[in-house]
Image (cartoon, rainbow, N blue to C red):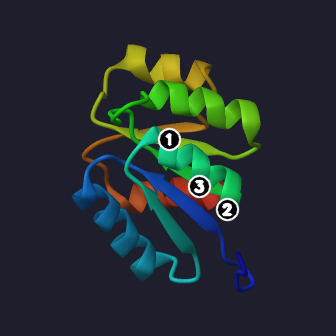
Amino acid sequence: MDRAHGSAVVLCVDDEESNRQLISKLFARRRPQDVIISAASGQAALEYARAEAPQLVLLDLGLPGMSGDEVLRKLKQDHDVPVIVISGHADQATRDRLLGEGADAYVAKPFDAGELFRLIERFI
């Protein structure tokens, strides 16, 4: 995929269309140079990751067919890409487990857009 200078390909993985749309709108406003690819399932996410080589993945845990945990493990095994988990599972044990499995950061839903984009700027 051709990209403008300073742009990044970001893969947003969430089974909820409204969440994918929200992320796309936030990027359009805050980082319009980036290309946002959306996936509603783990399998689609892995296919996009292979085809598009994103610079960042935003990953929800509750996915159909393949758990977010499994997607995280496969992404980290096959791709050198930072992964920010964005999930409604806000307990410390889940956060610690995911960071131990290779997540680069963890953000609980509902999230503050400013905080999320400060975190995103660390990776792209």
Where 99 falls versus 97 (above or below)?
below
Q: Secondary structure at mark 2?
A: helix
Query: Where is residue 102 shown, x and y percent of the image?
Result: 64, 28
Find the distance from the CA under tag 2 to the CA under tag 1. 14 Å
Q: What kind of residue is marked 1?
A: Gln
Earlier in the chain: of badge 3 and badge 1, it is 1
SS label for mark 1: helix
Comparing labels 2 and 1, the label whose residue is closer to the camera:
1
Asked if disc 2 and disc 3 are in contact, CB closer than 8 Å, the reply is yes
Above or below for 117 versus 106? below
Above or below, 104 relative to 36: above
Quarter of the image that includes the N terminus = bottom right
The Cα atoms of the two marked residues, 3 and 1, are separated by 9 Å
The residue positioned 68% from the left and 58% from the top of the image is 51
Let me know if residue 8 appears in the view: yes
> In the drawing, what numbered circle is on residue 43?
1
Q: Amino acid at mark 3?
A: Tyr
Give the structural element (helix, strand or loop) at label 3: helix
The residue indicated by pointer 3 is 48
